[in-house]
Image (spheres, rainbow, N blue to C red):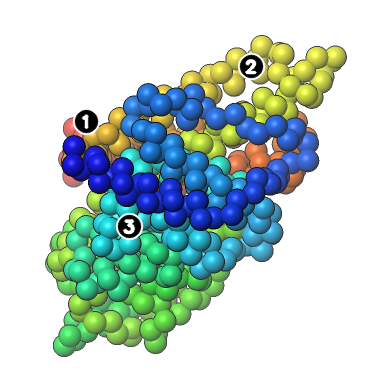
């Protein structure tokens, strides 16, 4: 009861912080062809008796929606065209409103709420009219920081977590390398202890926020031991001598999110920058991935709701052979099928979230949700785009951006096949090596 009261108090604080904001409601549509009627929220977003959300969650979502409508959506077109967005500016706005650390400890700038609030934030961020910016925000709030919050020393949290939660520093996550993506255990970057410093050599690939970040949550080999026991997570300031941002990678989607290739050439970082225990980095990263995957699923759910709704609106007004496209049974039945799948996935996510909050290992459910999220996003993008005809093939409509952006879901944060491997391990069907 006490815990509930203090959680509620903290949330009131947040909502008040958000209210200081001057809001206006001028959401710009990507498509000139879509009627300006707002997209209707899905069933689970409007009811109070939600499985994991209370009125407080909905209040939080509403506050965030105003920031999205005023500070983010009006600029998405420009940022997509520029291939980047002003992370420091946007993260400061979100950090000031408390959005970047809803489930982080209060003493490090967070709101100290449970992970269901992070899921609520991730779902709401799905209303941003592209995939790149929500992903960049997710890296900051729930991908590069969970291990630091859980296992980092108080000094390290003060130096890196606090300013990240407040939006004063931009974070990135350095796990993948040119030669190691799916097989995280085979990374080559080395951090060799010399006195009270690590000397780091190697490189990271596909680093989201990498051209703008102030620090990296870096996974590196800190010994020659077995691959699951020789790695550590290290907080690496990106302004140290020897850190080289080699290039910004051009991508098929997620245009507004900058993705970097980074090299480390004799970078010296104090040993105290290690997160938790030396040699535990692989385990910490696997735990961090659970949060990342659940966050990613929550985020794509709203985007899928919006694509279905915009497809309904478009096909209602577009007439072929004297009747709206939506009136053809093949169209409205297909959209009903897709919405059903979205709601099934939402149920799985909420179940996994509820179990996670209670301290259970949700690796199997999180992997299933991630697998299904990636596959459903691809299927839904393809089906909906089809009903827009030639318009769907233009870059003027959200559905074509979603088609490009959401393709990443089956690759990033563990490809579909990696998820299948994990699920098989839990089903005890993976052949022994
Ligand atoms: C836009 C973008 C942003 C990213 N952001 C980050 C970031 O911020 N930080 C970070 O560390 N990484 C990031 N990544 C990297 C991402 O997590 C990796 O791309 C992903 O893990 C896959 O690794 P890979 O690209 O090396 O593919 P590979 O490991 O080469 O895999 C290629 C393909 O092989 C198949 N495959 C994999 N395993 C198996 C298996 N067991 N059985 C059968 N087939 C299999 C899959 O189809 C897979 O797609 C990002 C990637 C992209 C594209």
Farthest right residue in view:
322
Left or right? Give the position of 145 relative to 30. Answer: left
Element on which disc 1 rests: helix
Residue shown at 56%/18% (left/top)?
336
Mark toward the start of the polypeptide (2 vs 3): 3
From the viewer's side, name the closer residue of 103 and 297: 103
Disc marking residue 427: 1
Asked if 190 appears above or below 208 in the picture, the reply is below
Q: Residue 93 carries which label?
A: none
Find residue 332 and name its label. Answer: 2
Nearer the observer, 307 or 155: 155
How far, Cα to Cα, is label 2 from label 1?
37 Å
Q: Residue 110 carries which label?
A: 3
Spatial distance from mark 2 to mark 3, Cα to Cα?
44 Å
Q: Is label 1 within 8 A of ligand 1 (CB to nearest ligand atom)?
A: no
What percent of the width, then of the height, locates residue 237? 36, 77
Residue 7 lies, with reference to residue 226, above or below; the image says above
Where is residue 205? Give x, y as percent.
44, 65
Residue in view at x 36 percent, y 46 percent: 11
Query: Where the C terminus falls, by quadrant?
Result: top left
What percent of the width, then of the height, locates residue 134? 50, 51
Q: What element carries label 2?
A: helix
């Amino acid at each position: 009861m006490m815990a509930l009261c203090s959680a509620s108090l903290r949330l009131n604080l947040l909502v008040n912080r958000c209210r200081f904001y001057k809001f206006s409601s001028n959401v710009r549509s990507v498509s000139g062809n879509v009627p300006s009627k707002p997209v209707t929220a899905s069933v689970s977003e409007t009811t109070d008796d939600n499985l994991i959300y209370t009125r407080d969650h909905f209040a939080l979502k509403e506050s965030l929606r105003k920031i999205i409508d005023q500070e983010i959506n009006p600029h998405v077109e420009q940022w997509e065209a520029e291939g980047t967005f002003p992370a420091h500016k946007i993260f400061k706005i979100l950090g000031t409103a408390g959005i970047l650390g809803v489930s982080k400890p209060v003493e490090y700038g967070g709101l100290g709420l449970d992970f269901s609030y992070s899921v609520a934030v991730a779902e709401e961020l799905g209303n941003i009219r592209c995939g790149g910016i929500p992903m960049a925000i997710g890296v900051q709030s729930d991908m590069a920081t969970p291990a630091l919050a859980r296992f980092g020393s108080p000094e390290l949290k003060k130096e890196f977590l606090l300013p990240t939660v407040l939006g004063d520093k931009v974070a990135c996550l350095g796990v993948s390398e040119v030669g190691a993506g799916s097989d995280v255990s085979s990374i080559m970057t080395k951090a060799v202890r010399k006195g009270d410093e690590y000397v780091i050599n190697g490189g990271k690939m596909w680093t989201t926020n990498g051209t703008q970040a102030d620090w990296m949550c870096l996974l590196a080999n800190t010994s020659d031991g077995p691959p699951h026991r020789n790695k550590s997570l290290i907080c690496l300031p990106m302004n140290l001598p020897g850190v080289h941002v080699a290039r910004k990678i051009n991508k098929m989607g997620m245009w507004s999110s900058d993705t970097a290739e980074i090299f480390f050439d004799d970078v010296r970082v104090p040993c105290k920058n290690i997160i938790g225990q030396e040699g535990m980095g692989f385990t910490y990263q696997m735990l961090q991935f659970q949060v990342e995957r659940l966050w990613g699923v929550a985020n794509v759910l709203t985007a899928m709701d919006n694509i279905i709704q915009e497809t309904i609106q478009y096909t209602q007004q577009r007439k072929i052979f004297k009747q709206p496209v939506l009136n053809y049974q093949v169209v409205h039945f297909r959209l009903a099928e897709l919405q059903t799948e979205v709601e099934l996935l939402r149920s799985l996510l909420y179940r996994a979230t509820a179990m996670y909050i209670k301290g259970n290992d949700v690796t199997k459910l999180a992997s299933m949700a991630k697998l299904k999220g990636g596959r459903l996003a691809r299927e839904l993008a393809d089906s909906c785009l089809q009903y827009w005809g030639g318009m769907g093939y233009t870059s003027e409509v959200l559905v074509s951006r979603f088609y490009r952006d959401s393709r990443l879901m089956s690759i990033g944060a563990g490809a579909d096949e990696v998820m299948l491997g994990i699920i098989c391990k839990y089903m005890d069907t993976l052949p022994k090596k």
